Structure formats: C-alpha cells, structure tokens
Amino acid sequence: MIRALLRAATVLAAALLAATVMASSAAASPISQRFSVPSGDNCTYGYTEGVLEWRSTAPTSAVRLTGVVVDRPSANEPIACRDDRRYTIATYVAYAGERPVDQAAQRVDNGVVRFDFVLGSSASVLGIDRVTIQICRTSLDGPSIRPDYCGREHTFRPTSIGPAGS
C-alpha cells in the first residue's frame, strides 16, 4: 500500500516536472515572424521589411524588431524610381488590447537604414498582443512635418503567419 502510494506520488511529481519544463521552454522560445510593409504608391517609394521576434506566445511582454527601412531611389537598387523629394518614416506600435504601450519610428531619405530594437522592454509593459506597422511619406520641401500620404497600416500578431488586416 505504501509502495503504491509512493509510486503514484513519484509519477505525479514527474508529470508535474515535465509539464513545467515544457511550459517554460515554450514560453522562453521566441516566435519569429517576417514582415514586409509598403508605402502603397506606384513605385513603392518607401517600405520596411524584417523580422518580429515575439518573446513568448501572446500576450507577451516584448517584441524585438530587426530589419530595414528603405526610401527610393537608393544606391544599387534595380528599380528605377525618380527622386520625389520626400522621405520615408516607418512607425511601429505595440498594443496591449486597445492601448498602445510602446512605439518606435525610423526615418530615411534616398537610402537604406537598418534597425534592431525592442518594443515593450520596460518592466511595466505587459500583454502585447499585436504590433502595427505603417509607412508614411513626407515632403522635404513643405513647411509641415505632417505626412503627404501613408500606406495601409498592417497588423501582426504572434499566432498569425502574415498581416492580420488593418
């Protein structure tokens, strides 16, 4: 009787340990997701592409973004876009529910800028369930810093394969 009870306790402890190890390794392994977001104009003057690395399954506390922001024309690029006297700004926003919790922006004019940053790296950020990315283009000649136009906002979630609509 005591032997059977000890055996049952050992099996239960092993099962709990296995479940804990599996859960912690699943939470620790990041989910990588590629993204590509255009400016929405005919020549695709501006775009950003790269990888979102979700630190765990949703809701997560941090998302690492690596990639590039491009504004055409840029050196050594096969697509011939004339210089339209605008620059490109890519905006990346992390949300927890309906609330924006962190954001970053990258600007480039006639070139390529590489980036590597983390959204939600603050200890107070919890529950990031999506990241939106949008490309806007702004005139170099105008007095305003307001964009002349923006492409569609793309939404990415850690469980989806690509953008999840607007």
Image (cartoon, helix red, strand yellow):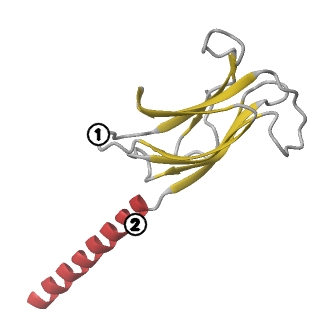
Residue name at image x 42 percent, y 39 percent: 128
Residue name at image x 70 percent, y 18 percent: 140
Crowding around mark 2 (Cα neighbors within 10 Å: few <14, some 14 to 19, many 20+) is few
- The image quarter containing residue 160 is top right
**Residue 36 visible at all:** no
Mark 1: secondary structure? loop
| Residue 149 point in image, percent of width and height | 69, 17
Q: Nearer the viewer, residue 33 or 42?
A: 42
Q: Nearer the viewer, residue 87 or 151?
A: 87
Q: Which residue has dot 1 on it?
A: 124
| Residue 67 point in image, percent of width and height | 63, 47
161 horizontally vs 30: left or right: right
Q: Nearer the viewer, residue 115 or 9?
A: 115
102 horizontally vs 36: left or right: left
Crowding around mark 1 (Cα neighbors within 10 Å: few <14, some 14 to 19, many 20+) is few
Distance from disc 2 to disc 1, alpha carbons, whole Å, reads 23 Å
Mark 2: secondary structure? helix
61 horizontally vs 150: left or right: left
> Looking at the picture, does residue 85 appear above or below residue 131?
above
**Residue 5 visible at all:** yes
Residue farthest to the left, as pictured = 2
Three-letter code, disc 1: Ser
Q: Nearer the viewer, residue 13 or 59?
A: 59
| Residue 58 point in image, percent of width and height | 43, 46
Which of the two discs, 2 and 1, labels the residue nearer the N terminus? 2
126 horizontally vs 146: left or right: left
Residue 25's label in the rendered image is 2
Disc 2 or disc 1, which is closer to the eye?
A: 1
Three-letter code, disc 2: Ser
- The image quarter containing residue 88 is top right
